Image: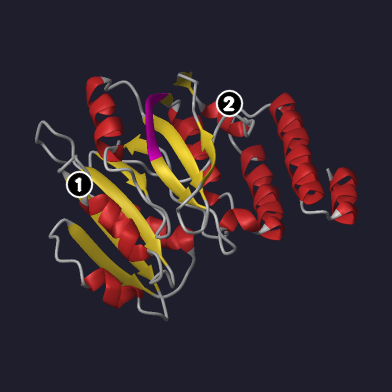
Amino acid sequence: MNTDTTPLISVIMPAYNMSRYIADSIQSVVEQTYPNWELLIINDGSTDNTAKVVKSFSDTRIRYFEKQNGGVSSARNVGLDKMHGDLFCFLDADDQLPDYSLAARGSRMKEQPEIDIMDGGVMIMDGKMDEVNNVYWPSHTGLIANLFIRVDENFFFGPNLMLRNRNISCRFNERMTHLEDLWFYTELAWKGNLKYDHVSDVVYHYRRHESSASSNLKGIEKGFHEYFKNVSELPGITNAQLSYLKKRIRRILFRSYIKRGNIIKAIKILKKY
């Protein structure tokens, strides 16, 4: 743990074949107004020029690791095992942080030591990062586990959260390729009774393109199946909470398939859930 009065923030970036985008993602960390950070880049067996791009940066705060391909969850777990930060957050290798992202969240968490998770606004961008498709603004404060379990529609579930490093024991479920971040946050919040707050700044720029995890409905459906199974095994979870979660999953998947014009699959979702 860092003993400096300014908390060290670890930014964990998994990367697989992201040479097209990763330079801009790294640069967005280098340009942070908050200076006390480390960027852990975990190359998950890329076969493109990802390694070459990463090694072109000379900032000593960047730490680079290579591993055999095992998926985004295993790459993030390497980052969790290697990080030194008092606080930590994630950044996907095709997304970017506004230059005040770490300062806004880190300063607030320093002021409020009772807060475990800090959120902020998220801009959903197009594939070229030229246009804003949507903006998510959080509003909740306080205990958070129940809202995570409900997959509350007022939350953007992604790498936009900053967490306090309390020697956490939870790790990403490496079987999950979708919603793995939602389950990670849920398990942490439920078992640790974590408190949540948010800043009024935009803290994350999310790039939505054809290869984004959020574009793969089949993967998302499988992820929800795994998520429901994992939630059902949490100690103290109630039948009422599981019933609500099942209805929420059904609604999300039904509306998603309808939006894609897949009426047959949408009807199957109603029968399945």
> Is label 1 in a helix, a strand or a loop?
strand
Q: Earlier in the sequence, mark 2 or mark 1?
A: 1
For the N terminus, the image quarter is top left
Of badges 2 and 1, the one in the foreground is 1
Q: Which residue is mark 2?
A: 146
Residue 80: give x, y in percent of width and height: 33, 52
Identify the residue at horizontal 70%, vertical 50% (top origin): 225
x, y percent for residue 241: 69, 27
Name the residue at the front extreme: 130
The amino acid sitting under disc 1 is Trp
146 lies above or below 266: above
Q: Which residues are magenta?
A: 197-203
Which amino acid is tagged 2?
Asn
State yes or no: residue 154 in magenta: no
Q: Nearer the viewer, residue 169 or 148?
A: 148
Q: Which label is found at residue 88?
A: none
Q: CA distance from mark 2 to mark 1?
A: 31 Å
Q: Is residue 7 above or below residue 29?
A: above
- Can residue 183 be seen in the rendering of this structure? yes
The colour scheme used to paint the residues is secondary structure
Examine the residues drawn in magenta and state their main secondary structure: strand
Does the magenta-highlighted stretch encompass residue 200?
A: yes
Q: Is residue 176 visible?
A: no
Q: Is residue 128 left or right of residue 231?
A: left
Quarter of the figure with the C terminus: top right
Q: Determine whether, in the image, residue 193 is placed left or right of residue 176.
A: left
Residue, disc 1: 37
Residue shown at 25%/54% (left/top)? 39
User: Label 2 crowding class (10 Å Cα cut-off): few <14, some 14-19, many 20+?
Assistant: some
